[in-house]
Amino acid sequence: MKQIPLAFGNGTSELDIPEKNLSSIIMPSEPEKRESGAFLIKKALENPIKSRRLSEIVNQNSRIVIIVSDITRPTPTEQILPPLFEELYSGGARDENITIIFALGLHRQQTEEESKKLVGEEIYKKIRCIQHDTGRCRRIGVTSRGTPVEIFEEVLNADVVVGTGGIEFHYYAGYSGGAKSVLPGVSSEEAVLTNHKMMIEEKAVSGRVDSPVRQDMEEAAKIFGLKFILNVVLDSKKGIVAAVAGDFVEAHRKGVETVDTMYKVPVEPADAVIVSCGGYPKDINLYQASKSLDNATQAVKDGGSIILVAECAEGIGNQIYECWNMECKTPEDAIERFKHCFEFGGHKSAIVAKAAKKFKLYLVSKLPEDKVRTAFFTPMASVQEALSAILSENPDAKVHLMPHGGQTLPVRKEN
């Protein structure tokens, strides 16, 4: 027997698995030793990819906008800004001409405390900081896929725009970062929803730069004229392990290479996979936890089983998702409904339904059993009980373990 602890909320859930059944433990390969985050950012700004340095682009009269992530993202904006300001100052930029804009997309407004925490007390005091407002967007074009390019007017009025953010896997845009600071970051509601409707297309999955959602975002950013980004890559402890700056596509792809090296793991699909989100906050609710389920689908054979280990202390996590779960009686219902009715939140129900049609889904959580069943999972009291159910049907089943399901992306080995 092999004993393995799996993160569950703020604690762990112990699993005993016979060694003959354990196919592999799928882990990210993170660098052990690294330079400081400040050093990596400074180096990236001094050596921008396919671009002049910011200090050569700005002058004392430049009106500068810096787009930063909102409170729902793990981007360490407070660490990113000081070296960025240093670079801008060396080109003559002045505080009174700089505006920081929080890229809310369609997320809620932040409190002043949250905004202050993101940029740091000192910068918040001396620099104008405002939040994106979907009601104050102007149309400047349309993408080839029909998405209106409607950008927050404060961004349109700037001479120089710098998009900041983090690069990690994103379950329908392929990756976060890059053009994402413009669309959805500072775009209109119509633009965001039109773009997000592409999430049900086949290539709109984690780890693909050719996701139609990302391609559309990049076309919108090009129409707008985004010239410069500063993005970071984080490890599982939220430490900066890489930074890229410069052209919004070329620099982004360099960051993507780092993400792939660390978090893409080649696997032979097994009979079953046991996936933990990595604990709190990634398993705070089912809405967040389903991202790990999505990654795990790549590690299991069609018709196999997935055991999702996610506490879900705050329940389902989205009202529309919960409504769809109650109203769609079968996975087919959810998939059909999504084809005819795009509703943000409902997309989660459709994505899980898609997985439920291909695999047997088990959930180890603190959710009531009826809520688990309506979400197309079979409820299990413990991970041990879920494994026993699989082994009772197939005693020789090969099982992969994914302790960091939110960050690890299994990639099927090509035969």
Image: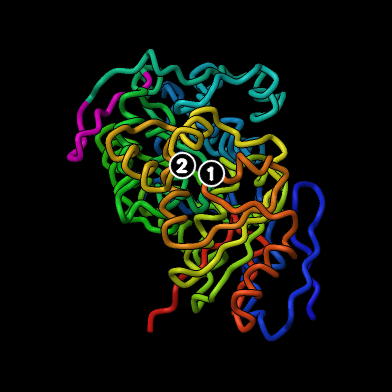
Left or right of 31 on screen, residue 272: left
Q: Residue at x 67, y 24 (%)?
A: 114
Mark 1 vs 2, N-terminal side: 2
Q: Nearer the viewer, mark 1 or mark 2?
A: 1
Q: Which residues are magenta?
A: 141-152
Disc 2 element: helix
Residue underneath mark 2 = 349
Left or right of 244 on screen, residue 86: right
Q: Is residue 355 above or below residue 96?
A: below
Return the x and y of residue 21 as percentages of the image width and height.
Answer: 66, 81
Q: Residue furthest left?
A: 144
Residue underneath mark 1 = 375
Q: Is residue 49 above or below residue 314?
A: below
Q: Residue at x 46, y 34 (%)?
A: 324
The quadrant the N terminus occupies is bottom right
Q: Residue furthest top?
A: 135
The quadrant the C terminus occupies is bottom left
Report if residue 49 is visible in the image. Answer: no
Q: Is residue 364 above or below residue 397?
A: above
Return the x and y of residue 327 as percentages of the image width and height.
Answer: 45, 33
In front here: 116 or 321? 321
Q: Amino acid at mark 2?
A: Ser
In front here: 16 or 152? 16
Return the x and y of residue 326 as percentages of the image width and height.
Answer: 50, 34
In the image, residue 143 lies in the stretch drawn in magenta: yes
Label 2 crowd bin: few (<14), some (14–19), many (20+), radius 10 Å: many
Q: Mark 1–mark 2 contact, CB under 8 Å? A: yes
Q: Amino acid at mark 1?
A: Ala
Q: Alpha carbon of mark 1 to alpha carbon of mark 2: how far? A: 7 Å
Q: Is residue 153 above or below residue 93?
A: above
